[in-house]
Amino acid sequence: MTTETETPDAKATLYDAMRTLKVRSGMFSVVATPGVTTLPEREQQWVVEAVVSYSYGTAEQVAAGEVNAEHGGEDSDPWSEHDFGAFEVAGERYFWQWDDYGDDHASYGVPNRYVLTIMRADEY
């Protein structure tokens, strides 16, 4: 049995809604690594703002320069699930990624647990 959350479009919609804070936070947890949590507060805020405002865009938007090439196109999201992003803040490279723990099959009655991890690239 395939559930709605198993399709790439449904996952992308869910991940985007959670990442941009359009759903209640009880659906997911956010974990930041020491490379983020030890930054000065203002830089931490910049990193979080970069994650929330991250845009995949379309290939046309990337080509037109409307979206940074690193933030769009099939290369950064090969499965179209919007579960990973890479960006720079103050000259430092960071990643964010969604992990999905649980069972996608609603028939089992176990909801998924979603975790958004934000890290400096050298911590990967």
Image (cartoon, rainbow, N blue to C red):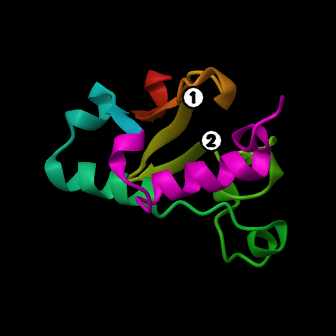
The residue that mark 2 highlights is: 83
Residue nearest the viewer, comparing 9 with 78: 9
* Foreground label between 2 and 1: 1
| Quadrant in the picture for residue 31 | top left
Q: Is residue 68 left or right of residue 40?
A: right
Q: CA distance from mark 2 to mark 1?
A: 10 Å
| Front residue of 84 and 44 | 84
Highlighted magenta segment, given as a residue range: 1-27
Front position in the image: 89 or 117:
117
Q: Is residue 13 above or below residue 58?
A: above
Residue 15 coordinates in the image, percent (x, y): 57, 48
- Secondary structure beneath dot 1 equals strand
Prevailing secondary structure class for the magenta stretch in the rendered image: helix
Rendered-image quadrant of the N terminus: top right
Residue situated furthest left in the rendering = 41
User: Residue at left 70%, top 41%?
Assistant: 5
Badge 2: residue crowd in 10 Å (few <14, some 14–19, many ≥20): many
**Could you tell whether 98 is left or right of 49 in the image?**
right
Q: Is the residue marked by circle 1 packed among few (<14), some (14-19), or many (20+) residues within 10 Å?
A: some
For residue 68, which quarter of the picture?
bottom right
Tag 1: amino acid: Asp
Q: Which mark is residue 100?
A: 1
Q: Secondary structure at mark 2?
A: loop
Q: Which quarter of the figure has residue 70? A: bottom right
Q: Position of residue 58 (x, y in %)?
A: 78, 68
| Residue drawn at x 54%, y 36% as measured from the top left | 97
Q: Is residue 106 magenta?
A: no
- For image coordinates 44% across by 62% down, the residue present is 22
User: The residue under label 2 is which amino acid type?
Assistant: Asp
- The answer to whether the residue labelled 2 contacts the one labelled 1, judged by CB atoms less than 8 Å apart, is yes
Closer to the chain start, of discs 2 and 1, is 2
Tell me the residue at 83%/74% (across/down): 60
